[in-house]
Structure formats: C-alpha cells, structure tokens
C-alpha cells in the first residue's frame, strides 16, 4: 500500500497526468471572470500568498495593471511581491534559475514563483523553449510547496504564421498536456473585451486606443503599451490567483452537470489554500456509494481519514484541522467505486 501511495505522491509533484494537476490558464477570458471573484477570495490571496516575480519592462506590465486595480479599489491590495530585475532571456538561457532557487531556499514561506519573457520567445528555437519548460518542471519537483507560473511571450506583429506564435503554442501545448499553470500574456493582448480577435497585433496594443476612445479606461504608464493592456493583465492575474486558491467560475457549468450534479465524481481544490489552522474540502458525487477521503504527507504516509463509508449523491464538504502536523505539502485523495482523484494542499504554521 505504501508503494502505491508513494507513486501517487511522486506523480502529483510533477503535475503530469494526474487528477491533482491544475491546468489553469489566465487568458483574455480571465479579464471578464475577474468581476465575479468574491471579496473573501481576494482577501485570502492577499493574506496567504507570497510571490517571487522576475521581470523586466514587458513583465512589468502585469505589476502596472495590479497597481491600477489597487488605485481603483483598496480590496485589491497585493500580497507580498518580491520583484527581481530579470527575465527568461534568449534561446536556452537558464541564468534566471539560480536567483530563483536562492530566494526560495532562503524564504520558504514564498509559495508562488513567476518569471516573464522580454523578447525571448520571438527569437527562440524549439530546443530553447524546451530548455525553459524542462527547467520549470525541474523547479516544481524541487519545490513542491510552490506554484510555478509558466508564461507566453508578448505579441510582436508576426501573426499566426510567425515564430512567436509557434513558440507560444509550444508552451501552451506543454502546459495543457502536463497540468501546468499558464499566464498567457500574448492571448490577453490578442482580444478586446468584446472578444474581437487581433491576430496580427503587437505588444503596443493598437486596439486598446480604439477601445478607449469609446469606453472609460484607466490612465497611467504601461511600458511598451497602452495602459488598458496593463489593466487587462492585472485582472487576469487576480483570476489566475483565485483559481490557484480553489475558486472557479466554471464549477457549475450547466452542460457538465445533470440535475445540478456532475456526470462523474468531482474533487475540488481545498479552500483556503495555503491554510492555517483549518481548510475545507468539497466534492460532488453523481450517485451514492462507498467513499474514502484520505490525507497523505510527502512520504506517502496516511495522516488523516476524513470520510470512509457510504455517502449519498450530492455535494459534500468536510473540514480538516490538523493539530499535530508540521508545515508542508499534503495530498488528499478521494476514492470512489468510479474513480480516484488526488489534489495538493499546503499547510503553513
């Protein structure tokens, strides 16, 4: 039994091909979903997350957008944000890795790590993109308590047949196939709020000027671009963080449910996450049956059984309040007669 559980933990750590893998994408649709995030989720993110962000001027657009949102509403006060003057470089550059490691090694309370591109995706090769993807995955394995955010490169006007699109799609495909979290910088620049697509746009966001001629927009500095482009990226960032925290606008999508229930058992991300002293775990059952919900530590040892018996169809919620467990990463697994699903959570003392 221990060997089986260890295998589950190992796969969950890499985020490849498991139910615990979180394929979250912050794209142009996230800008609209931002409006639906509950205030309690925003407050939990501000209090519970500490973010390492390596960026130069293009990556700084995200921070400018976040600043605009704080100026509009103090609710969107940022969590601790460590900004480092660095980016992902060009064609296989890995110089950014050492500083990220140094910071995470010496600041173990940091639980989100991001690194932005400058122009590196526009002048890269398949091998160079793969080096980036492999380094990110390597970091995920070495720091299982940290959410690593992958990113695409900014638009350069090359259009769908250009090298940038090819390389960005390579990043997107990898993230989708391996359950990664992606901040799709280029996609956010490619669509206006009405959903109109601008395939040949550049990072200058020319459509932003037309849009803001007709609508009230933000005002302020945005490196290389219009302030509204920064504003959209800030909104998408908050939606991404809310989904990392366990919130999702799509939990109750009508065509995925029958009489309000999913077609198959669904295990949700715990909330809050990270947590202290307690967290809630919710799951839906399409039909009644035998259920076991269990918590494991990184070594695959069972530390709590939260449910073990027959449950009816419907929505269920359990609370875990560990009293003698140390800070760290834990996995919770829902096993039914139909499926087995595992997710990851972080306890911070």
Image (cartoon, grey):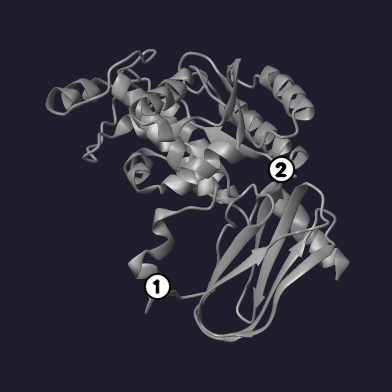
Residue 160 can be seen, yes or no? no
Q: Where residue 84 sits: x, y (%)?
A: 61, 17
Instruction: Point out the frontmost of discs 2 and 1.
Output: 2
215 and 58: which is toward the camera: 215
Q: Is residue 338 left or right of residue 309?
A: left
Q: Is residue 154 left or right of residue 2?
A: left
- Residue 257's disc is 1
Numbered disc 2: secondary structure: loop
Residue 345 can be seen, yes or no? yes
Name the image quarter holding residue 137.
top right
- Residue 344's disc is none
Q: Where residue 319 sits: x, y (%)?
A: 64, 65
Q: Where residue 13 sits: x, y (%)?
A: 72, 49
- 127 shown above or below 243: above
157 and 138: which is toward the camera: 138
Q: Disc 2 designates what residue?
A: 145
């Amino acid at each position: 039994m221990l060997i089986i559980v260890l295998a589950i933990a190992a796969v969950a750590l890499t985020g490849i091909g498991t139910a615990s893998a979180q394929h979250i994408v912050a794209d142009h649709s996230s800008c609209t979903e931002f409006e639906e995030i509950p205030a309690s989720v925003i407050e939990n993110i501000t209090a519970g997350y500490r973010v390492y962000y390596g960026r130069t001027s293009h990556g700084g657009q995200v921070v400018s957008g976040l600043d605009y949102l704080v100026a509009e509403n103090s609710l969107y006060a940022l969590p601790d944000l460590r900004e480092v003057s660095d980016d992902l470089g060009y064609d296989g550059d890995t110089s950014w890795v050492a500083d990220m490691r140094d910071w995470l090694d010496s600041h173990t309370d940091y639980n989100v790590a991001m690194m932005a591109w400058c122009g590196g995706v526009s002048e890269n090769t398949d091998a160079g993109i793969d080096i980036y993807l492999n380094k990110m995955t390597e970091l995920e394995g070495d720091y299982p308590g940290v959410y690593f955010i992958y990113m695409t490169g900014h638009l350069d006007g090359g259009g769908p047949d250009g090298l940038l699109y090819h390389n960005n799609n390579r990043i997107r495909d990898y993230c989708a196939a391996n359950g990664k979290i992606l901040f799709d910088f280029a996609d956010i620049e490619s669509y206006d709020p009405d959903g109109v697509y601008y395939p040949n746009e550049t990072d200058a966001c020319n459509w932003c000027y037309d849009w803001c001629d007709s609508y009230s927009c933000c005002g302020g500095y945005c490196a290389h671009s219009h302030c509204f482009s920064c504003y959209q990226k800030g909104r998408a960032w908050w939606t991404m963080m809310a989904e990392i925290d366990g919130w999702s606008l799509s939990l109750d999508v009508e065509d995925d449910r029958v009489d309000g229930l999913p077609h198959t058992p669904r295990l949700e991300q715990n909330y809050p996450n990270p947590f202290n002293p307690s967290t809630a775990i919710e799951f839906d059952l399409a039909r009644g049956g035998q259920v076991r919900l269990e918590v494991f530590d990184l070594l695959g040892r069972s530390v709590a059984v939260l449910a073990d018996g027959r449950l009816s169809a419907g929505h269920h919620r359990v609370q875990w309040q560990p009293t003698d467990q140390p800070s760290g990463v834990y996995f919770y697994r829902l096993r039914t007669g139909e499926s087995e699903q595992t997710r990851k959570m972080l306890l911070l003392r």
